Image (spheres, helix red, strand yellow):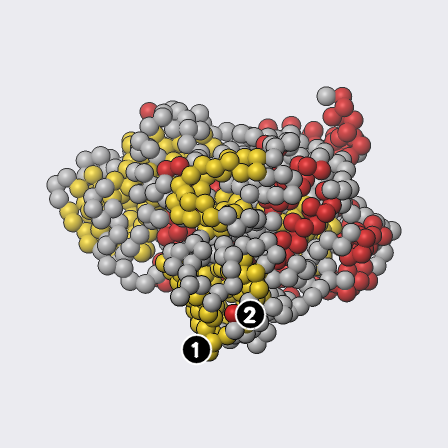
Amino acid sequence: MIGLIWQGIKDLGLKTLWNSLQYQLRQRRYRTETAAVALEDYRRPGTVIDMSRDGRTVTLQTVSGAYAITVLAPNLFRVRFRPDGDFVPPFSYAITKPDAVWPPCDFTVVTTDAAVTIRTQRLTCRVDRESGRLTFLDPHGNVISEEAEGIAFHPAGPVVCRRRIQPDEHFYGLGERAFGLDLRGRRYETWHTDPQTYQLEQDPIHLCIPVLVGLHSQGQQGYAILFDNTFRGHFDLGATDQDVASFEAEGGEMRYYFIYGPTLASILARYVELTGRTPLPPRWMLGYHQCRWSYYPDERVRKLAADFRHTYRVPCDAIYLDIHYMDGYRCFTWHPQRFPDPAGLIADLHTQGFKVVVIIDPGIKADHRYWVCQSGLENDVFCKLPDGRLLRGPVWPGDCYFPDFTHPRVRTWWGELCRSLVEIGVDGFWNDMNEPAVFGPLGTTFYDVTRHDLDGRSGDHREAHNVYGMQMVRATVEGLKRLRPDERPVCITRSGWAGVQRYALGWTGDNESKWDSLWLTMPMVMNLGLCGLAHTGPDIGGFNGVASGELFTRWLQMGVFFPLMRAHTNFHSPDQEPWSWGEPYLSINRRFIELRYRLLPYLYTAFWQCHQTGAPIVRPLMWAYQDDEATHTLDDQFLCGDNLLVAPLIAADADRRTVYLPAGTWYDFWSDEPIVGPAHISVEASLERIPVFVRAGAIIPMGPAMSYVDEQPVERLELHVYPAAGSGQALLYEDDGESNAFQEGEYRLTRFTLIATGISPTALEIRRATESHYTQACDSFEVVIHGVHHLPLEIVLDGETVAPSQCAVDSDGHSVRLSVGPFRCLRFVWTE
Ligand code: GLC
């Protein structure tokens, strides 16, 4: 304890600690007590007494309120219940697609004595007239999800919906949770919290998303519920009553969106249509990124750059500056001694092919001589208490004021502040502490009574808390779009909410340099992806604590396959750079970072698919094998894009692990050995290896092992072909990787079709068709066919015979390669 206090004094200073203490005392005073409400005090909708239909909405009058059920799409219904029955158009930070924009959708409403039934081709909602309870059914009448006691509300504000858990139901989603993949059996809070290092099973942490995905009936039924209510809430997934899953909030409206799959892919496609798509990031965001708290002064940053480029020759695309670049932690300033010439530094880093990302927190130091504070006071942007005084709370710079990002005018003001950094060359913004966090133990945030604009609707922090961080990154991104309209904005956030994916990518916050933290990254990133936030990744190596060389290397190997590949560490931890542990780690780390770069064409295509369809980049195996129950709780391996299965090592001193391969044939990425699933296999994985398998029928496009920003464009692509019996499809997406020209058609999408007679085929054909046009697209290919050991007898390229001697068998003896130009059909034959 004394140690902790001493550390606190050293880190923050006595004054900030004292302010923090006072703040916490006041926080108690200002906490709005939500009545401890007993279930019997809740009221229920009661019997349905009247029904009317207007356009897409069916209104059901009940004894104590009304439902408005709106059919937005054949598999998407919105359910609202209000005791006052007053259904003004809903305001939502999560939703981007207004009702009027959804295409017309046919549905019928049938009323009987027993029920009112609303039916589309894909989904039925049956409202029991007597109880007022809702059941969702598939077109065959099977239950997808049904209410237990159903909806209830309390006169003091709380609302709840209690649903029956299906016998073999698994639950996923809910944003960033420090639990395994299947969330069933526990209670979770939706109230973003800065945990200052989270442990396994700690809840809540930085980024909650009120999206629950349910899967049951041996994977035949899949659905999602978006509880569109930003108040502090809970999801209880069978913790209190093992047969009941409930979601509740301390205030606001009972409003949820029900999306029927049954496949996870169709759920996500609909969900991102509703809440917004992940933008295509600039390609440098897919490179390796190096961060620590903090690289300073500027000479240290220059040395880091030189270490990457010259001393250790490790590819890297971005260097991050944490809080020490600022003058006394004042946002939008530079420390005059540590960074006397930031523009010069950034220009030099750009010349060496690095991008620069800087941290910006929401707290603005309450210092009336500081320009941002002055501007904020003049423009009346800071959050206030009910008596009109400004909210003040301690964060890194000491006492701060906090912009009210729920006000459109404040967001514009903030966006304009970004100009100062954009003009000196900063490439990306890293928005931290935006739960929002105020110094103090767990749960210290703004006082409940703090006032917010809430986009003109006005309310307090209980309603604004969960969207504060999302509105901060919205302000940043909207500013960046105004300042650099031709570039793709980059903003990384620690907190967010449903829909945050349309503004920012996330990282999984303050984890630990421990093996269970490494493992936890997988279910976390998978569940975030199932909530639409697909672009995420952990602090590789762990944030708090001291990573061993082995832990870092294992984490990095896994990070190769994550959307964001960034190493980061705490101020109190030793450096975590790829060379920090010497050999053999340096060489292994370099090889894996090179592998990341080689995989960029594949990964970038996966990002494009995500942008188009909502399919996450990192997916649980059940994404592709939903009817295989062995995948429903599997959270120590994952799919990366369409065709790679990755099974990281998650324990110290391990050189072997069990891997589950679902049905079909899989090629060992390293040895090309084909293995037939479903099977649990034991795989050898010394430190130089991470178990990776390629789905048979795949084509994996790979590029050179070099950093994207320093050497472009790519001159030759390798097409790694993994034959299977029958036909397979693969995609390759290319564009300039930085501008928005792709939105005007400046891109090329290649569809490959692979037809083969089997593994080690006697004949194989690759067809290649392109869509749209991008001038710099790569037209030179090295086709590498895996799992074959001999030169073909015959090669036909677009109708012309090619001498088999043009091919070469690789030195490992289990693949054959051929260089070709922009072909349309390439055929190989091995036997007569
Ligand atoms: C928070 C962030 C961490 C950052 C630190 C200092 O703990 O989560 O990534 O390094 O603040 O800014």
Q: Which residue type carries mark 2?
A: Ser
Quarter of the image with the C terminus is bottom left
Side (left or right) of 617 relative to 134: right
Is residue 722 visible to us here? yes
Q: Quadrant of residue 544?
A: top right
Residue 591 in the image: state x and y as whole percent: 67, 50
Is there CB contact under 8 Å for labels 2 and 1? no
Q: Quadrant of residue 354?
A: bottom right
Disc 2 residue: CB within 8 Å of ligand 1: no
Is residue 502 visible to us here? no
Residue bearing the label numbered 2: 805
Residue bearing the label numbered 1: 799
Side (left or right) of 71 relative to 399: left
User: Image point 42% across, 58% down: which residue?
Assistant: 761
User: Image point 19% across, 35% down: which residue?
Assistant: 130
User: Image point 28% across, 41% down: which residue?
Assistant: 144
Outermost residue on the left side: it is: 113
